[in-house]
Image: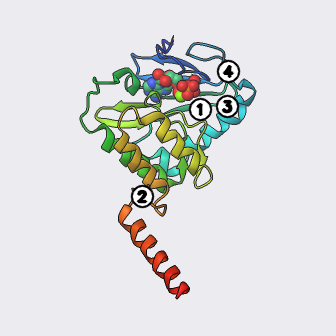
Amino acid sequence: MNKWTKYKTSHEGVGTFVSVWLDEDNGLVKRTFDGDHCGEGVSKRTSKADILFKNEIYWLTHPELSESKFLPELIDIDEESRTIIQRYYGPNLLDYYPDKFPISNLSEQILEMYKFFHEVGVNKLNGALSNMSLNGDQVIAFDFKWARPAPKANAKEVKAFRKWLTKLDPDLVEELVKIKSPNLPRKKKYNGLVVMDRTAELYRSLQKKKT
Ligand SMILES: Nc1ncnc2c1ncn2[C@@H]1O[C@H](COP(=O)(O)OP(=O)(O)OP(=O)(O)O)[C@@H](O)[C@H]1O
Ligand SMILES: [Mg+2]
C-alpha cells in the first residue's frame, strides 16, 4: 500500500505547477498535472496542463534520456489523471544551498549532465537547483514539462543557465553557455593595442592621400 503525503515546498517562487506527493517509505514521488501546485501563490497556466503533461511524457520516455543516469527511474504514467510516478531519492538541491551540498563536485556533474542533454538534443529550460536532486552521489534532473528540442530554444536555455545557476557558480555558467554556442566568440576584452594599431594605419593612409 502506498502512503502518499502531500509535499509542500519551503522555497519561494518554486512549485508553481504540479501537485507533488511523496511516499518516502517506498521511495516514490507522484506529480499530478491537475491545476494544483506545491508552492505558494496561484498555479499559473493551468489551461496548458495537458500540453505540458504530454511534453513531459515525451521527454521522460525518450530512449536516451529514460535510460540515462541523469533522470529518476520512471515508475508509472497515468494519462487519465495526468500523473507521473518516479523514484524519489531525496530532497531537491536547493534544500542544500548554499553550503550544505553532500557532494564536492556538483558543478562538474551539472556540466556533464548538460553536455549529455545537449547530445540528446534537449533544452530543459528550467535548470534550477529546485529541479535537481541526488541519486546517491549522482546529480539527477526532473521536471521536463518546459523542455524543447534543440537547437530551437538554445537562446532560452542560455538565459536559463544564467538565471538559475549564476548564484551557484558563475564559471559553471560560462562552461554551460559554451556548450550551446561553441562558435560564438567569447566576450572579447578591450584590446587597446589593436585599436591603436588600426588608428595609426588609418592615419598613415590619410596622410598618404594628402600627399
Ligand atoms: N524526483 C524528485 N525528487 C525530489 N524532489 C522532487 C522530485 N519531483 C518533484 N520534487 C519536488 O517537488 C517540487 C516541485 O516539482 P516540479 O518542479 O516538478 O513542479 P513545478 O510545480 O513545476 O515546480 P516549478 O514551478 O518550481 O517548476 C520540486 O521543487 C521538488 O522539491
Ligand atoms: Mg519545477
In the picture shown, does residue 153 fall above or below 29? below
Disc 1 marks a residue whose amino acid type is: Ile
Q: Disc 1 vs disc 3: Cβ atoms closer than 8 Å?
A: yes
Q: Which residue is mark 1?
A: 77
Q: Are marks 3 and 2 in contact (CB under 8 Å)?
A: no
Marks 1 and 3 sit apart, C-alpha to C-alpha, by 6 Å
Q: Circle 2 sits in a helix, a strand or a loop, which is it?
A: loop
Residue 33 rendering spot, x and y as whole percentages? 65, 25
Is label 4 in contact with label 1 (beta carbons under 8 Å)? Answer: no
In this rendering, the label closer to the viewer, 3 or 4: 4
Number of residues whose C-alpha sits closer than 10 Å to that of mark 3, classed few (under 14), some (14–19) or many (20 or more): few
Q: Is mark 2 within 8 Å of ligand 1?
A: no
- As shown in the figure, which amino acid type bears the numbered disc 4? Asp
Mark 2 and mark 1: Cα distance apart in space? 48 Å
The residue that disc 4 covers is: 34
Instruction: Single out the residue that lies furthest toward the left.
Output: 104
Closer mark to the observer between disc 2 and disc 4 = 2
Which residue is disc 3 drawn over? 79
